[in-house]
Structures are given as structure tokens and as C-alpha cells.
Image (cartoon, grey):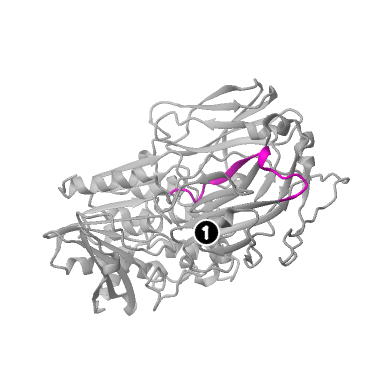
Amino acid sequence: MTEIAPVRTVAHAFTRDGRCPTVPKMFFRSSLSHRKILTILLSLVWLPATTQALDIAEGWRFTKGDDPAWAQPEFDDSAWKPIDVGKPWEKAGHEGYDGYGWYRLRVSVPAAASEGAYFKHYQRLTLLLGTVDDVDVTYFNGVEVGRTGSAPDDTKGHYETIRRYDVPAKHIRWDAENVIAVRVFDSDGDGGLHKGAPKLSAPVWNDFVMVDIAHAHADGIYPTGAPMDLSATIRNTAFETLKGTVRFQVGSDTWLVDQRETFADISKPVQLSAGKSHLETLTFEPPSAGFYQVTCTFIRDGDKTPISQSRMRGYAPEKMNRPAKAPKDLRAFWDKTIAELATVAPQYKVEPSPKWSTEQTDCFLVEMRSLGDVRIRGWFEVPKSAGPHPVLLRVPGYTQGMMPTQSIPDMAVLSLNIRGHGNSTDDEPAYQWWGPGDYLLRGLDDPQKFFYRGAIMDCLRGIDFVASRPEIDTKRIAITGGSQGGMLSFATAALDKRIALSAPDIPFVVDSMKGFKITAWPGMVVRHWLGRDPKNTWELAGATFSYVDPKNLAGWVECPVLMGVGLQDNVAPAPTAFAAYNQVRGPKAYRIYPEAGHSTPPKHEVAKMAWIRERFALEK
């Protein structure tokens, strides 16, 4: 899945418990006589001040391809197939599909939705689609009401962005059929309306209150030697003054709220004037270096709807104490594994791939044999200019299929698909959702059989390949990757001294057992595994992961390291990334993006490539 920057997480309530008994469940039918009649049950849920929300999670239709006519309400979509939303289209009958796809829904909007005070004031409904992977253009009755990103130029960094678009009253057909159409483009990995239940609702007060926790320092990191001066702004853009309670909390670094230890908790009454902002501050003395979850919440008097924001903030993370806990035979384990790899004849195959060549680079499809005689492949791009060239080894994220970059003309690039990824699935199956097919669980009961033992050796075999090429300067080899690729970048640099630079981004499964404890995913993968067999224990999992955990390997890294971190990453959390980073003994630097989740923004890619080029003495 593409990796992107997240959005502000504000807990808006779009529905409430307590359905009004006088409001009937509603049905609608297709208006086209030749269309197969489709009847859909919509739950009408009453909100305060007579506002209401329609649950529009059911009844969507989908087709692949792209045609602007599909946005129009009169278009006949009866031949389109029904599709479940709230999950990637790959898991809803369209496995392996990348490109354009359209969703459409026909929905009757009751006139009662226009009776609330907030609708009367603002003259709009709110369309909530959840998250869309990667980019979308959304239409209501043929009129564009919102878009996020664009294809093909701006597809990255949007898949965690919650789509929340305003629908002006003038475009709504009351007590009649309306058509919502969503044009989606997905560049790779999962795609579509992939998370969240779509809703169409009239505005309520909490749509106009926002909590924004300040960065304080540009990257959200506070230096040692002083308290953390925290602040949050509560903005009330509604037309009325709101009275309530503000609560400021500081907790431990887990993303699991019910397991969070509280270090500070202060509440007080507050009045939010209409159209004004209110500032709250808190001075916090951290008990130790590390990371803390800061939460600010507003609750209106007489209401139970919290408007809240939580943000991870760091305190001197480079001084955080998370020592390595390596098994005693760690060095022997990897020495033996590398020796075993050396017994496998690489059997390199290199075939020109003109489709991916550019005016400045030639591209080749490469194949080689790795540990266990497993076939792996990748894309090798070489500048047409005279060499020898420095080379960048790109390694994949979890389930990612690597493709040529076509964007780096001044160095060679090997985009390597480790076993089970991309076009390297002949001998190692591709990812399978849950069960033993999950990469994290393959061989988890035995370090010798563990998936990542072979995956890391695939990276070393990739280094063998580029080192065998006459057009490559073997003293200038860099490695980079995000998420799983960040973990592989750490591990490969630790085990192979031919690596001159390592640039791990948002490294995944680092300080692994802590990471599993403080995340929903990937933590849930291991927690499910524990319940499948009495032999599966936390200790057994920890023992296996200890051999591949970058926290235990990073002390062997001698080359310069540049690490990219998303401070709001709830998959590969910042505290775990620094557990490895702090073990690196050589030159190192990090860049933290305070609002990024499991991603780094485009500017990080620019900064990272500039860092590599500078150290490889390439012209900017």
C-alpha cells in the first residue's frame, strides 16, 4: 500500500444512539424503467436539533475504467457490479487491480434533513466517505463537491486522508433520488473506498469545533533540560457560543488508549465564543526521555460528544533508553546464514525492458536465486552515461511490489522484490490476509525458518548482484526503503559492509515486541497468532523476532544513516524507530515529520536523495 501523510484526527460524531421511533425506515428504487430494481434499506438516525444522518454504506456499484459520463445522475449503472465499501477493492472482488475505478450510489434524501438550525444557517450537507486509496474526485448529482490529490501527478500521501466534503443545498433533490459518484485512481497496492462507513448528514455543532495541538518545536520534539510547554487551540467556527469542559492529558506512548498510563490530567470549564479560538496550555515535566501521547478534549455542556485530538510528542528521543536484547548467538546465527547464502549459485538473468527505459536510463528485468534457492526478481535501471555509477538499492514495504523509478538518472537503481513480493512469488507465496500466509507469521516458531531470515538474505543477494556489475562503483552502494523496507535497510546495512549509506524510513517491526504491544496493527497479527495454538507464546515470538529486530542489529551498522520518521505513525511508532537509531554507532541523522503517520511526505524523498547525492559526490 502506498505510504502517505495522515490527516488531523478529530472525533466527530456523525450518528447517535436513540433512533426516533416516529421516523420510518426508508426505501428507494431505481428511477430507470429498464434497470433491475434495487431496494436498499437506509437507517435514518436522528441527531440533536432535528439534524439527521443517512448511513450510506450499502448499495454501492462499481466498475473499472474511466469515463466522465459516469459522474452524471442520468447514467445507467445497472450493469455495474455491487461492491462493499469500507474495504479495498482488491478484497471486494477486484484482486490485483490498479488504475481507475468508479463507485456510484443512488440515495433518497429526506426533506426532514433540512430542518435543523445548523443546516438552515450553513445550507449544506456533509458527505463522509472515509479514506480513499489513492486519490478521488467526488460528485453529487453530477456536480463536483470535492477532490483529494490528482492522477497521475499527485497520487502519494493521500490514502489515510479522511474524505469529508460539503454538499451545497442547491444540488440536493429532497425526498427524491440523488446520485453520488466517486472517481478513484489507485497507483499500486490496495485501492478504493477502503476504510470507514460512508455517511451523509446535516451539520451539527461539533462539525464546527476543532482541537489543534501545537507543534511547539517544528518537528514536535522537545529538547532535554526543560519542561514540555504544551498548547492546544480550540476553534469554534459555529454561529453560536458553546459552553463546556476542556481536558488536557499526557499519557504514555502506546496507541492503544485503554492501555495508556496517565502522567497528567487537568480539566476545567470553558466558554468558546462564536467564531473565536481559545488557547489552552500545560507545562509537563517528563519522567524520562522518550515519547508521550498528548490529548486535548472539549465536551459541550449537556452533550456527550467529545471533540478531541491526540498527538505524539517527543522528549529528547536520542537519549531514550531502550537497550538491545540480542540472543547470545546472534552473530553466529547470521554468520552461518550468510555462509549458507554463499552456497546458493545466484544464476543471474538480465533481460532488457524497453518499456521502462527512458531517454537517460536503460531498464532491465533481473532474476537471481537467494537463500533456499528461492527465485527473486527486480528492476535494474542504469544511466546511459559512462560509469562506473553509484547504485541505490530500493527494498519493499509490507506487500509492496517494487517497480522501476524512471526518475533517478544520475545513479543506477535496483528496485528489488524480496521473496513473496511483487514479481518474486514463484517459490514463496504472495501475502495472504491473516493465517499462516501473513509474512509476520511464516516460520515464527523457529528463527531458522522465519520469513525475514530469507528476506534479509534476499537483500544481501541484491547487493551481490549490483557488486557483480562492471558499470557499478562498489564503494558507493546505498539502500533505502519504507516500513518493512526501513527494517530491511537497517538489517542489510548491519550485515553487509558493502553498504555505504543507509536511509531507513518509518522502519517496521523495530523493538518488535514493544511495537506489537502498543499498536492495533501489526500487534493484532501476533495477538491472533497467540490464540491459535497453545504452543504459540509471547516468549516464542519474541525469541524469533530478536534475531531480525533492527534494535539488536543496528549496533553493527557503521555507515552513515538518515532515518525518516512520521511522528503520528501508529503502525511503526516513533518510539520503536529510535530504539534502533540510538544503537547506531556511526554518523547518523533523523528527520521527523510531526503530522505524518505511517509515511513520510514528498519533501523527505527530496531531502533523502539530496543527502545521498551529496555523500556520493554527485552534482545536484
The answer to whether any part of residue 333 appears in the image is: no
SS type, badge 1: loop
Q: For the residue marked with disc 1, what is the amino acid?
A: Asp
In the rendered image of this protein, does residue 128 appear above or below residue 371? above
In this rendered view, identify the residue nearer to me: 569 or 454. Answer: 569
> 372 left or right of 132?
left
| Image position of 105 with respect to 354: above or below | above
Residue 383 visible: yes
Q: Position of residue 489 (x, y in %)?
A: 32, 57
**Residue 318 coordinates in the image, percent (x, y):** 35, 40
Q: Residue furthest right?
A: 22
Q: Is residue 503 left or right of residue 85?
A: left
Q: Which residues are magenta?
A: 157-177
Quadrant of the snapshot with the C terminus: top left
Residue 168: within the magenta?
Answer: yes
Disc 1 residue crowd, few under 14, some 14–19, many 20+, Cα 10 Å: few
Residue 458, by quadrant, is bottom left
Q: Position of residue 123 (x, y in %)?
A: 68, 34
In this view of the protein, which residue sits in the foreground, 476 or 516?
A: 476
Q: Tell me: residue 535, above or below residue 223.
A: below
Looking at the image, which residue is at 32% across and 71% down? 377
**Does the magenta portion include 20?**
no
Which of 413/212 is in front?
Answer: 413
The residue labelled by disc 1 is 67
Picture coordinates of residue 449 (x, y %)? Answer: 41, 73
**Direction from residue 358 to residue 567 in the image, left or right:** right
